[in-house]
Image (cartoon, rainbow, N blue to C red):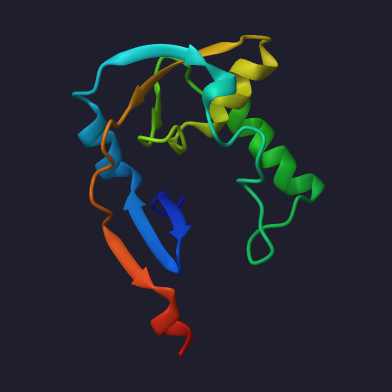
Amino acid sequence: MSKQRYIEINDNVKSIWSIERIWELAESLPVEEIAIDDIKGPNEVTWFSDDGPQPTCREIAKHCQRINNADLSYPVILTNDYRVFDGMHRIAKQIMLGEDTIKVRRFRENPEADEVIDLAVEQA
């Protein structure tokens, strides 16, 4: 599997974080249990996009396998505004189990991105 990354695009700026680095930085954050409904992401399209894998039967089956194998002993890692840096498959598993809450580690201030790309400059 390729290195996992978290990507956000805001105001024509693409910010990219290495998930391995996020795991390291999150180790010192406290674990708390929060309502899944407080998390941004479970009701949004996150695994599929126009320029990525499409939701074919095979692609959905791959995600189902990852959901089934998700280890709920690891807390989900959230951004300061409750977006998911890492753990969407764990969230899906918790939802499938009928649970309303999940353990998380949340950054109060997001770490600096590993890479920042000005999309306005790239498109020019």
Closer to us: 18 or 111? 111
Q: Is residue 37 left or right of residue 121?
A: right
The residue sitting at 47% across, 20% down in the picture is 71
Percent position of residue 29, x then y: 23, 23
The residue sitting at the front extreme is: 11
The residue sitting at the bottom extreme is: 124
- Regarding residue 23, the answer to whether it shows in the image is yes
Q: Is residue 19 left or right of residue 51?
A: left
Q: Is residue 3 left or right of residue 98?
A: left
Closer to us: 81 or 64? 81
Percent position of residue 36, x then y: 56, 19
Q: Is residue 64 above or below residue 93?
A: below
Quarter residue 33 falls in? top left
The residue sitting at 59% across, 33% down in the picture is 66
Quarter residue 11 falls in? bottom left
Percent position of residue 103, x then y: 43, 15
The residue sitting at 68% across, 32% down in the picture is 64
